[in-house]
Amino acid sequence: MQEKLLEVRNLKKYFNTKKGLLHAVDDVNFYINRGETLGLVGESGCGKSTTGRVVLRLLEATGGEIIFEGSDILQYDKYQMREMRKQMQIVFQDPFASLNPRMSVSEIIAEPLVVNKVFSNRKEMQARVKELMETVGLAERLTQTYPHELDGGRRQRIGIARALALRPKFIVQDEPVSALDVSIQAQILNLMADLQKEFGLTYLFISHDLSVVKHVSDRIAVMYLGKIVELSDYKSMFKDPKHPYTQALLSAIPVPRIDIQRERVLLEGDVPSPINPPDGCRFYGRCRYRQDICKETTPELKNIGEDRFVACHFTNNLKAAVK
Amino acid sequence: MKDNNLLEIKDLTIHYITNDGTVRAVENMNLEIGKGETLGLVGETGAGKTTTALGIMQLVPDPPGKIVGGEIIFEGENLIGKSHAELRRIRGNKISMIFQDPMTSLNPVMTVGDQIAEVIKLHQKSNAKDALEKAKEMLTRVGIPAERSKEYPHQFSGGMRQRVVIAIALACNPTLLIADEPTTALDVTIQAQVLDLMKKLKDEYKTSMIMITHDLGIVAEVCDKVAIMYAGNVIEYTDKNRLFKDPKHPYTIGLFNSIPDIEEDEDRLKPIKGLMPDPTDLPSGCPFHPRCDKATAICAEKAPQNTEIEPGHFVKCLLFEA
């Protein structure tokens, strides 16, 4: 039986803006099993990065529960949370902005160890830093270099080493390879897979790149305007996407093959504003199957069997919707 | 020049001469583009794709850039050595360019209608009113209602802005369109819309196109021919079908292996080992040899020549030199 490491229930994050309330994350539910990777995909502004940050309490949630190993971390005070953070880490998208330019590679990787007073002895700490650098494939001669001297791939390895320093159980990967060239991207993806196996890590992998997400994830959640519209294992999702948005999203990927012709579902228009969204399905305006009910009632994320979840009034029945 | 060719690049070499050394951005490039054809120019950061585009437009910043040698024959005439006035009549008129980031390539304090009309006024000697009419027509062509011509770039979304840029680029009906990563800044569903639009307009106007991209998926979708670049060199150049069915150069093969395949399951990716070389200090011999699985001792010594392994399939690799 698989055990849930993290469960998110009715998670909400609203931002007050001049124009009104921005629903960045709106009533999101998911769980991640121990040792598993949950991919979180969606386009810019859909709330995927905000979700990642709220889960770590880097941003305070507006409402909901975040159950990590059985207890709701939203109830934790500052001190409990600081302990908790050793278990949960993050790797950021931009390896240029997320590393302090005035710290050397070893100082950056040692920082979490220093902050949490893990070692009393300097030598032991340096040994741990050395071990971490080796784990992520950074040459020892780079210990005293600074981030600006290194390329994007190596910088991202520093970010990963730093995230591993406190031996976490759970890592949020927020677009960790989006800034990298494909040949380097493949190296980093392999590294992350190796680390997951070696240390039994659980990942929340956030990305806009569907082929990358499919490659790394066990299950995938698709977000649209602050809501999860579909969540299922990667195989069923790619074979038979149920939500009209997932269908369009998957069909829009340019596939680097010439032997496969795919039917493309072109969406009209752009993603609408998440500020004061109207009732009903968020995808209403762009959906080719839309009906009156979609405008009035917000579809719930329902289990349609085999642990597949879809938020659409016409799941399994899309054709009937367009009579 | 062959009859059907619109553009021929012959032995083009562009260097950037900096205090830290000479960057060999483009080395001995040979490419041809036929009328109505789309050439994909593929490579990773620093491969020389954008420099090639700027070279064709004669816009390489000088200093530090220098076109060291070669010819760029466009419609039968060498663009290198043309006067500023002559080039100005070509740019934006016969050759136009779409840049990656639509926010930085549009003027934020000018309405989009005026920006499209500007090109038309400059090149077609029409008066302001006619130009604006034509601009509105262009807007509708790219799927934006004509009444939005009075709006400013910030009032549009990323995808819409790129449509405006496309309208500007096509306003004078160019024979060659250079698109430098036109959809990289866009979300995938918007990218699909923009690519679809570009394909449609390209066919309608019978424009030739150079599509600069790092995404082989986009190449599969829109290109007829492909040139793969690595460290300033075109290392493989052939038609799309051959490249996808039977890639020859170890770097091309490595690129394909690095991309997660969306149609199949695979446990591990097979990345290219190592890192991109320092452009001011390229490895001796073949610039790819330190990362190449098939490299032998000679690869570090001898620079590979462009070899035609079968008609229309060029590879720069010692493995294929007789």
Image (tube, rainbow, N blue to C red):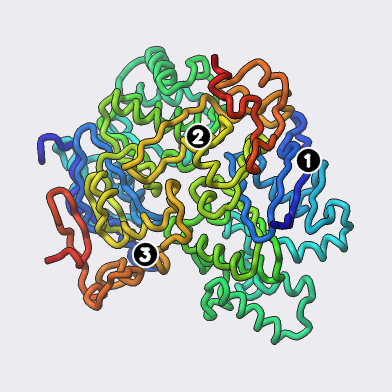
Q: CA distance from mark 1 to mark 3?
A: 51 Å
Q: Which quadrant does the N terminus of chain B fall into?
A: top left
Question: Is disc 3 in the same subunit as disc 2?
Answer: yes
Instruction: Indicate which disc residue B279 carries.
Output: 3
Q: CA distance from mark 3 to mark 2?
A: 35 Å
Q: Is residue B306 left or right of residue B144?
A: left
- Are the residues tagged 3 and 2 within 8 Å (C-beta)? no
Q: Is residue A128 above or below residue B318?
A: below
Q: Is residue A290 left or right of residue B238?
A: right
- Going 46% across and 22% down the picture, which residue do you hit? B114
Q: Secondary structure at mark 1?
A: strand
Look at the image and tell me whether residue A276 can be seen.
Answer: yes
Q: Is residue A267 above or below residue A226?
A: above
Q: Which quadrant does the C terminus of chain B fall into?
A: bottom left
- What amino acid does circle 2 point to? Thr
- What amino acid does circle 1 point to? Asn
Q: Position of residue B61 (x, y in %)?
A: 36, 50
According to the image, label 2 marks what residue? B189
Q: Which chain letter goes with mark 3?
A: B
Q: Report the front residue among B153 and B265.
A: B265
Instruction: Indicate which disc residue A210 carries.
Output: none
Q: Report the front residue among A292 and A179.
A: A292
According to the image, label 1 marks what residue? A10
Q: CA distance from mark 2 to mark 1?
A: 28 Å
Q: Which chain letter goes with mark 1?
A: A
- What amino acid does circle 3 point to? Pro
Q: Position of residue B129 (x, y in %)?
A: 41, 12
Foreground: disc 1 or disc 3: 1
Image quadrant in which you'd find residue B309: bottom left
